[in-house]
Amino acid sequence: MKGAVLFSLMCVAAGAVVRAAEVLRPRGVPLSKASFYDPSRDFSCLDGSGTIPFSYVNDDYCDCQDGSDEPGTAACPNGFFHCTNAGHSPLTLPSSRVNDGVCDCCDASDEYASSANCVDVCRELGRAAREEAVKRREERLRGFQLRQAMIEDGHKRKKEAEGKIEDLKKEKEEADTLRTEKEDLKKAAEEPEKEALEKYRAAESEKKAQEQAQQKEKDEAEAREAFAHLDNNGDGVLTKEEMMSRQTFDTNRDGQVSEEEAKFYLQQEDTMSLETFIGTGWAMMRPVYLMDKRMFTPPSTTPPPQPEEELTPPPPVFDEEDPYMTDGELDDEEDEERYEEEEEVENFDSDVDSEDDGGDDAEDYDLPDEYAEGDSKEDDDEEDEGDAPKEEEEDPKYDEETQKLVDAANEAREQFDEADRRVRDLTRELRTLEETQGKDYGPEEEFRVLEGNCYDFTDREYTYRLCPFDKATQKPKSGHGETRLGQWGEWTGPEGDKYSRMLYSNGQACWNGPTRSADVHISCGTENKLIGVSEPNRCEYVFLFSSPAVCTKPEEELSEETTHAHTEL
């Protein structure tokens, strides 16, 4: 009996709740505005523009300027229709979409007088939406847990970096002290070395001066000899007529020396004195003069010495154009052509002994190896075999005591260089760590773990790369080279959500355009991933990046959803 009474009381209470929830109101009016639509009195326009009988509400005629008298029809262009959508989320849409043949409300309330066959699917959609909300909540919870791990890792890395900085500072102090000691030792070792090398430098300078003086005397003697040879009458003046008598100066090879050719070598003068010849004239005439002397040197009557292992020469071969020209003559012509091309120099006086001339020429010119005096295949072989011994047999450059001082100074310099290099390496590493510590990795260091990593996204044409706190780049899939879209700049998120956007600026300049930049939008996700890239404006890129670092507690999201639902009920 008592159970029956209790059940009856529960049914009455449930009915009271249902009746409380089912507040009567005109079609299209949200529950929050139901009190303004009281059928027992006239209706006042919500904007205060006028008052009309309640029977004018939803009569398909727009009486109020704000359209508040027609919430359930399409009569007012500025009106709004509210879908209750029981079992799902409520929806407010423009009144122009009422009875337009399109099912906008899941409860079909917007198409009550149209031919559209709309059915109430709010419960199914609500169920799917709740399942999706649960899925999002679980994903957000997982992201929040990962964020906590990132925060922990970030604090750990920060602490390790601080410890590393302290260690580097101490190590740098020790390295500075060691470098100072090595620098003092280097200076102490270089002083006696410098004093010991002074005498060698003086001797080398004196030797060089002597060699230059000897060379100058030799060149002057050569010039005097050539002048005497060209000065036909021996009057100490070289004339253009004397120059014209020498086929040596036939520049254009027409068989005679013209006046212009002669004056060219006389520096556009008719005569040239010995002093001018030695000073400037000989330098211009010397190449062609020595070439001419070499070409017209009479052949030596003494046969050249034959190598012991020389084989018997082959029979002569005759040229098709000149059947009487032998191989030897052909070789002579080839040698003369090769000498002309390489401008090699031999004796310029046929009366001078061939050995002396060859020695002078060897000093003046760098002859090819095959024409150098005394060269032969046997000599080449001996040189190749004896390269290393020759280096070892070279006379020492300094005496024993001086060499010891040089070696000691070299060792001191090497030790100082090593100590100095160590200081510079430590300074660079310390500066990098201090710069890293100065970056903003979020309020709880949650973004620090992204430092040093890069994330790629590839579309149809390009591969984009984001290296957080470093750079953003673009690389074509079918080409080479990388385009810098920007360097790490700053956080640019809105107030209250600062760490939701990154700006990478000062990239490579576009052709006739601005410098490139990348705006990175960060959303909650269970992994750090570059999920999309677009270019809404020229040279301005938008990167979409997901990361657990921005995932908040899911309870906050649920609280917002609960508040919204309570507003409708």
Image (cartoon, rainbow, N blue to C red):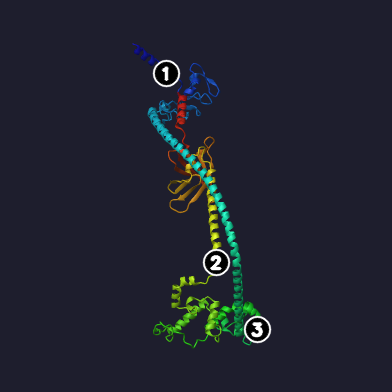
From the viewer's perspective, is residue 2 above or below residue 115?
above
Is residue 58 among what the camera can see? no
Which residue is found at the position 53% from the left and 70% from the top? 396
Say which mark, if any, is on residue 35.
Answer: none
Horizontally, is 431 left or right of 13 in the view?
A: right
Horizontally, is 339 left or right of 233 in the view?
A: left
Where residue 244 appears, as percent x and y from the top left, is: 60, 84
The residue under label 2 is which amino acid type?
Gln
Q: Looking at the image, is mark 2 or mark 3 nearer the viewer? A: 2
If you read the primary sequence from the N terminus, does the residue marked by circle 1 or circle 2 appear first? 1
Spatial separation of the CA atoms under disc 1 and disc 2: 110 Å
Say which mark, if any, is on residue 17.
Answer: 1
Closer to the camera in the image, 514 or 400: 400
The residue under label 1 is which amino acid type?
Val
- The residue indicated by pointer 2 is 403
Spatial separation of the CA atoms under disc 1 and disc 3: 138 Å
Which structural element holds mark 1?
helix
Closer to the camera in the image, 277 or 109: 277
Say which mark, if any, is on residue 237.
Answer: 3
Where residue 177 appears, as percent x and y from the top left, is: 57, 52
Residue found at the very far bottom of the displayed protein: 301
Q: Looking at the image, is mark 1 or mark 3 nearer the viewer? A: 3
Which structural element holds mark 2?
helix
Q: Looking at the image, is mark 1 or mark 2 nearer the viewer? A: 2
Residues at marks 1 and 2 touching, judged by CB atoms closer than 8 Å: no
If you read the primary sequence from the N terminus, does the residue marked by circle 2 or circle 3 appear first? 3
